[in-house]
Image (cartoon, rainbow, N blue to C red):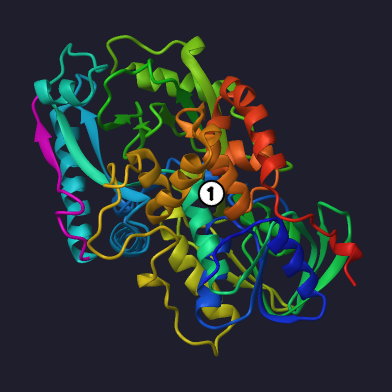
Amino acid sequence: MDTSLNATRRARELAELRDAVVDVLVVGLGATGAGAALDAASRGLTVAAIDAHDIAFGTSRWSSKLIHGGLRYLAKGQVGVAHESAAERGVLLRHTAPHLVRAQPYLLPLTPAVPPGQAAVVMAGYRLGDALRAAARTPRAVLPGPSRVPAERALALAPPLSPRGLRGALLSWDGRVVDDARLVLAVARTAAGHGARILTRCRALSLTGDGAQVRDELTGAEFGIRARAVINASGVWAGELVPSVRLRPSRGTHLVLGPDVLPGLRAGMHVPIPGERNRFVLVLPQADGRVHVGLTDEPVDGPLPDVPEAPESDVAFLLDVLGSVLAEPVRREQVAGAYAGLRPLVDSGDGRTADVSRRHAVLRSPDGVVTVVGGKLTTYRRMAEDAVDAACPGAPASRTARMPLVGAPRPGAWVSGPSSDGVPARLAERYGTEAAAVQALAREDRSMAEPVALGVTRAELVWAVRHEGALDPGDLLDRRTRIGLVAADRQAALPAAEAALADSWDPPVTPFDSIS
C-alpha cells in the first residue's frame, strides 16, 4: 500500500484523470474531505480529492487540538451530538490514531470567582461526561475519570496559578491530538494508500452533480474531472461552490505563548468566562513547549479570507480571562503569536454563534452535489461516512471505524517514549511507526540531524517533501510542522525549508498541460 504523496505522484495522477471517470470527487482536503476520500476509497470506490491549497490548509489546522467527548453539547441538551462525539473520541484513542491522540488532564481552578454551587454543577457535568465515556466503551485506563484535587496538587500541576483564595481544582480528562494538521495528513495519506488521488493546488471553479471544472494552481491549466458522485467538503467556503448552502461562520482565536511564559505547566486548564455558563477559555500546553490559549466564538460577516487574522480585541479578551487565575498576568508583549480559524456552522437563523449546534448536516443540491458542513474535528470520520452514504447509496458499508491511519501501531503497542532503536519520543509522537524511517534519514546524512526550530530536524522537512506531499515552504513550516505559528521562528527556519525542497524533489515534474 503506497501512502507516499509527492510532486511526481501528483503529476501522474493528474494526467490519469484526463481519461477517467471516478466514482467520487471530493472537494476540500480538510479533516472531513480527507475523511470522505478515505471512506469512499476503502469501500472500493475510485476517488479523486482536490484542494485549492494544501492538505489541512483551512479550518482543520486552526483547532484547539481537542478530541473531546461533547460535554458542552450535553449541557445544552444535545445528547445525540454529545454521544456521537464521545464515540468518535474513543475510535481515535483506541483504534485509528492512538499515536496522535492521547488523554490530557485539565484543571478548573476553584478560585473565589467560582462559588461552591457552580463548582458542584461543573463536577456533575464532568461525571455525566464520564458516563458518556462509559457508554462509548472507552476504558478508564485510556481516559481516566474526574476528581477534585487540593490546592497543593493543583499548584503542582499548574505552578503559574495564583494561590490566593485557591480552594483546589476540578480535574478532568479528555482527548487531544498532538497536531491537528498531522491528523488530517494521516487521513489523506491513508486514503492515498487505498488508491485515492489526493491532489493539492487544484481549485474547483464550478461543481455539478457529475464533476467539476478545475484549475491547476501550479500551471494555470484548466480541465474537467468527471465523476459519478460529488461531495463538497470545502468547509466555510462551501456556499461559494453551492449557493444554496447557508452558513454562519464563526471565528475562533488562539494565542501562542512561548515555553517560558507559563513555566512548569503539566496540565491544561479550563478558565471560566465571567458571565457565561458552560464556556471556558482553554489553556493548552503543547508538546513543543509552547502553550496555546483559546478560544473565542465571534460571528464573521462579509468575504471569507483564505487565512483569517486574529484581531486585537480577541487577544485582549483571552488575556483578560487567562489573567483572572494567574499569579502574574500574561502581558501583551509576551504573546509570541496568534491564529484564528473559521467554523462552518449551519445557519439556524437566530442566536449567537456560540449557541449554534455543532451537529453536522449533509445536504443535496438540485443537481446532485452532496455538501457536508458543520460538525467538528472530533467527528470528522462520522461526517465523512454520512457524506459518502448520501452520495453513493449503493456502496458497501463504511470500514473506517476500526481502520488504523498511517503511523498507527498494531493493537496493544505503544509508540510514545524512546524506542530500543533510539527513536526520540518527539518523533514517535508525531510519526508513530514511521518515526524510525524519519530517524534513518538523519543517520544516513548527519546534516539532516541538524535542528531547524523547536526540535524539528531537516530530516523531517525532507520526509515531508518525499512522502507527505509538501510542495512549498508554507506546506513545510505551517502544516507539516507548526514552526510558522510564531513569525520569528518561521523566518529563522525558512532557509532550511527552501533547501529541503531543492534537495528532495523526485525526478523533474512534467506540467499537467504538457502531458499528452
Q: Relative to residue 186, is residue 392 depicted above or below? A: below
Quadrant of the rendered image containing residue 488? top right
Quadrant containing the C terminus in the rendered view: bottom right
Q: Relative to residue 403, is residue 313 depicted above or below? A: above
Residue displayed at 55% across by 61% down: 188
Tell me which segment is drawn in magenta: 137-150
Task: Characterize the local packing of mark 1: few (<14), some (14-19) or many (20 or more) Cα atoms within 10 angstroms.
Answer: many
Q: Relative to residue 210, is residue 54 depicted above or below? A: above
Residue displayed at 17% across by 20% down: 155
Residue 514: x and y in percent read: 91, 64
Q: Is residue 431 left or right of residue 298?
A: left
Residue for badge 1: 60
Local SS, label 1: helix
Residue displayed at 81% across by 52% down: 217
Answer whether residue 453 is magenta in the image.
no
The reply to whether residue 133 is in sight is yes
Answer whether residue 148 is magenta in the image.
yes
Q: Is residue 199 left or right of residue 326?
A: right
Residue type of the residue flagged with mark 1: Ser
Q: Judge by depth and name the residue closer to the eye, 440 or 121.
A: 440
Q: Judge by depth and name the residue closer to the eye, 344 or 346.
A: 344
